Image: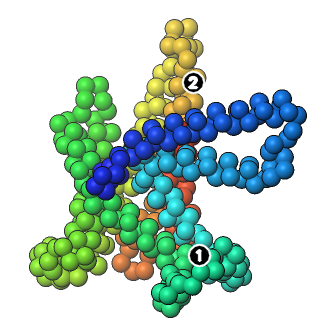
Amino acid sequence: MSDEDTKPGAPAPQEVANKAEHVEDAGSAVEKKLEAVEKKLEIPIKQAPGSALKLLSDVDKTVLRINKLLAAPGGLASFLSTFNYTLYILAYAQTKTPALTSILQKFLSLIRTSSVVTKPSTATLVNAGAVPPIAALAVLISKARTTLRLFGCFPLYAWLRALSAGPKPGADVVLHRIALLQASSYFTYQALENISLLADSGVVGPSIIAAINRGDSKTARVYLWAYRAWLGGVSCDFLRLGREWQLESRRRTTRARMQSEGKAVAEYQDEEDARFDQRWWTDAMIAGAWFPMALHFSSSTGGIPGWNLGWMGLCGLVAGSTRVTQLWASTV
């Protein structure tokens, strides 16, 4: 997808990641040499500015790990999603805690340079529009994520095409039909969102929107049906989880009966049961986090009462926490 896009003459993300690994290795070697010198001279080199060096070292390692995360498949989308929903929570907290605004402004004043800037700063422009900087950044990241999803139809089409060939030998027919319904729902959602985004950006003419929207050239109703298709796709996860639990319960009941009859069963079943339970509950948590958000946006009557940026940020963070945690752990 667009994660692989680079400017002309710029190295690919994977190449940059490989070079960064060499830099990190070199940094580790220098650090080891400093430790050796410190032991020989019995002088605590890092003790004098210890906290500052430790902070710089931590920042350096964090930046390199973030670079690895962004270069990983799906890393950019996961990072932007986590960052976006975190900003939603901060923006909501800012509206509930006026003191937070003054604290942030004091902090920014400490790191500003004393040079005179002739043009208005970004903060001035944001404040002139009565939009908090955190909320403005959240909107900007959200628009970037929506733009990146313009290419989301391709993997969904590949998934839908693979499912259209029928279930694989030995696969459960019910699960296959649920997957087919889910892939169709997500593909519909992505296609409608893409058309609406292109129309709002002036790429697609109003006549095309009017042709699929009962003569109405506005995209609001198209977005509504897109979110309803998203809700259908999320709801399919609950159907899938219910069917998987049903099949797993049957397998465990059969195994327990065989054991009671003294028949041999496969080894390491406890470990497999634990892995299934962990994956099942993780998927249930993710589906449960996405569902209220999809339900809110798919409603034409105002959505869920009391819904706000805080709830949306929390749901998004819970839904994406597993993926981000896995990607972050792989950067060590």
Q: Is residue 181 above or below residue 143?
A: above
Furthest residue toward front: 41
In terms of image quadrants, where is residue 161? top left
In terms of image quadrants, where is residue 142? bottom left
**Callout 1: helix, strand or loop?**
helix
Q: Residues within 10 Å of mark 1 (few under 14, many from 20)?
A: some
Residue 281 seen from this side: no
Q: Is residue 54 above or below residue 169?
A: below
Q: Earlier in the sequence, mark 1 or mark 2?
A: 1
Task: Give the left or right position of residue 287, taking residue 233 as reference.
Answer: right
Indicate which disc residue 306 carries: none
Q: Nearer the viewer, residue 41 or 329?
A: 41
On the image, the x and y values in percent for residue 15 come to 39, 41
- Distance from Cα at disc 1 to Cα at disc 2: 42 Å
On the image, the x and y values in percent for residue 20 come to 50, 42
Residue bearing mark 1: 92
Q: Which residue corresponds to the image point at 36% horizontal and 78% vertical from the top-left?
A: 300
**Callout 2: helix, strand or loop?**
helix
Q: Residues within 10 Å of mark 2 (few under 14, many from 20)?
A: few
Furthest residue toward right: 42
Q: Which residue corresponds to the image point at 74% horizontal and 36% vertical from the top-left?
A: 34
Three-letter residue code for mark 1: Tyr
Q: Nearer the viewer, residue 232 or 1?
A: 1
On the image, the x and y values in percent for residue 172 come to 31, 33
Q: Which residue corresponds to the image point at 46% horizontal and 59% vertical from the top-left?
A: 80
Three-letter residue code for mark 2: Glu
Between circles 1 and 2, the one closer to the viewer is 1
Residue 39 seen from this side: yes
Q: Which residue corresponds to the image point at 28% horizontal and 35% vertical from the top-left?
A: 173
Residue bearing mark 2: 271
